Amino acid sequence: VLFRYILKQFGYETFEALRNEFNNKETSPSTTGSSYFAAILSLRAEKTLDNYTLLSYDEAIQGYEKRLRDHRAEPYLSFKYYQWFALLFSEYYLDQYAHHSQLLLDKLNEYKQGIKEYKHLSNYTPNDLKKLAYWMATGSGKTLLMHCNYWQITKYISNWENILLITPNEGLSQQHYQSLIESGIAAKLYTGSEDSLKTRDGEVLIIEITKMMSQTEGK
């Protein structure tokens, strides 16, 4: 429901329609300084989002891209269309959640009622708005997008008690730790001690899921 609702805000009924328009396109800047993707979206009469807000989201995404390039010393790093749209959807959602959460809740429930295959679903509640899930293929750049998601959530929502990155094993914990540091994001590894659970403001605590239980069974 959420995915199709956000698609509609940008003028698309299906992801296939969006993919067919942007697949194999690059995110190079247009003559106005916006990305190519944002320039095309701004011309769509079907979208409900105003161009000023759309371009502000695009400016933020270009900022995340630049931070990755600068910190990781990768001057040619640029987002593919599906990466850019993943960040655009997140930017839109977090902005709505932070500033217009009740309106977002009402709009999602109203949209759901208008779609035959969704009518049987229970209504969104305020707690439902606190959860986001991403489904992306292996090799699609999830790790760097997660770093951008970190910058997004800390921009729109303050006073995080904890920010946890949960991994399946110690090897991946080490990989994520190195990658976060390379992107300029404060991070630490959980070592098993109580002291290693304490984080500074905005610091990411990396912990294996196997260390979040007192006893393990099987694999």
Image (spheres, rainbow, N blue to C red):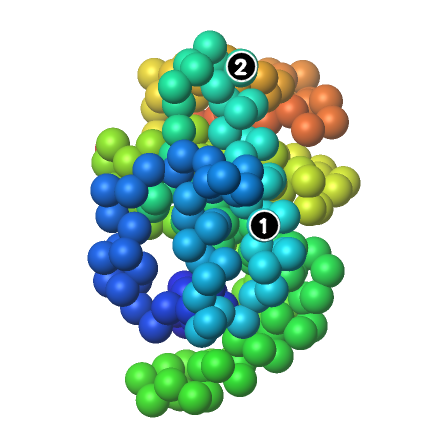
Q: Whole-percent x and y of residue 208?
A: 43, 27
Amino acid type at image mark 1: Leu
Q: Give whichever of 61, 206 is nearer the camera.
A: 61
Image quadrant holding the C terminus, namely top left
Q: Nearer the viewer, mark 2 or mark 1?
A: 1
28 w.r.t. 5: above or below: above
Q: Residue at x 30, y 68 (%)?
A: 14
The answer to which quarter of the image holds residue 152 is top right
Contact? badges 2 and 1 (CB < 8 Å): no
Q: Give whichever of 128, 34 is nearer the camera.
A: 34
Q: Whole-percent x and y of residue 57?
A: 58, 48
205 w.r.t. 213: above or below: above
> According to the image, label 1 marks what residue?
55
Q: Residue at x 59, y 59 (%)?
A: 51
> According to the image, label 2 marks what residue?
71
191 w.r.t. 99: above or below: above
Q: Is residue 210 visible?
A: no
Amino acid type at image mark 2: His
Mark 2, Cα crowd under 10 Å, few <14 / some 14-19 / many 20+, is some
Query: Which type of secondary structure does the marked residue at label 2 adopt?
Result: helix
